[in-house]
Image (cartoon, rainbow, N blue to C red):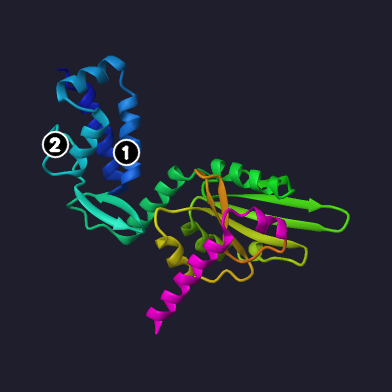
Amino acid sequence: MKQEPLLQIFERLSAYCQKHKVLSEGELSVKIRECVNSLSDAEKEELEKELRGNLEALIFKSITTSTEKISVFSPDMHTRINYQGEVFYCLPTHGYLAEELEEAFLRWAKIRSPLSALKDLITDFLERCNYEVKDETSVCENEHCELIAVKKDKTTHRDLHLFIFSSIKFVPQFREEHHATLEKTETEETVIVVPTEKTPAPFISFVREHEVGGVMIWVADVEKRAVNPFIGTPKDAEIEKNFANPEQARRAVSTWMRKINFFDL
């Protein structure tokens, strides 16, 4: 078997692992898939025949275990860490810093919950509530995008200013840097939209550590095409009616807050 394709894959993955030191399970899987997809069909077939298994799975095990190495050139990230409901791997010789773990979480959030998908869902939700998304005030950037939604009829004029993020963990820094931007006015409500997470941990951390004032936060589930409230109640009853399960969502938040108060005593 020609080893060059496998060696090239491990060289690319080693450089990526050395650069970041800590990778989420999801990010590592994506990078492995990218490398495998760069092979020709013939190269992939030959490697899988020789190694007797799915190439992506074998490479993942080779990197994340100490007993299933398929090459001496395989990077070693068998140290496993659970953080905010996600699994991460780090170099065993690296005394990882908390900042690197946080950066790894945020990198994975951008991959897992692209702003374009969140924007598409929230636009569809607002249109069902009879709002017109009339102005995208900024192009979807690395960490957020902004939308303006307007509802007009004979008796009402409502404006929503929405900020969409790939994770609730992006919100505190943005709020600190753009505090005035997030302040609501008499005619405009401010909404932060964030995606669901694997566990409630990031949301519990957020409500424990941060205040948002009069800003609402909605949670979007792209897979289920659903939006629910997290913090705040909209003035528009039609929005409330279109939430997937607002009562259950608010009960969950209330439970988290009670547990937080108990441990703070």
* x and y, in percent, of residue 20 in the image: 31, 47
Vertical order, 12 against 230 (above or below)? above
Q: Residue at x 39, y 57 (%)?
A: 199
Three-letter residue code for mark 2: Lys
Dominant secondary structure of the magenta stretch? helix
Question: Real-space Cα distance between discs 2 and 1?
Answer: 16 Å
Taking depth in this image into account, of 101 and 203 the one nearest to the observer is 203
> Callout 2: helix, strand or loop?
loop
Label annotation for residue 201? none
Looking at marks 2 and 1 on the same chain, the residue that comes earlier in the sequence is marked by 1
Three-letter residue code for mark 1: Ser
Task: Mark 1: give few (<14), some (14-19) or many (20+) Cα within 10 Å.
Answer: some
* x and y, in percent, of residue 102 in the image: 37, 57
Q: Mark 1 points at which residue?
A: 29
Q: Name the residue under label 2.
A: 69
Q: What residue occupies the far top of the structure in this picture?
A: 42
Q: What residue occupies the far bottom of the structure in this picture?
A: 265
> Callout 1: helix, strand or loop?
helix
* x and y, in percent, of residue 104 in the image: 36, 51
Residue 238 among those drawn in magenta:
yes
Specify whether 102 is left or right of 59: right
* x and y, in percent, of residue 137 in the image: 68, 48
Magenta residues?
A: 237-265
Residue 223 among those drawn in magenta:
no
Vertical order, 103 against 35 (above or below)? below
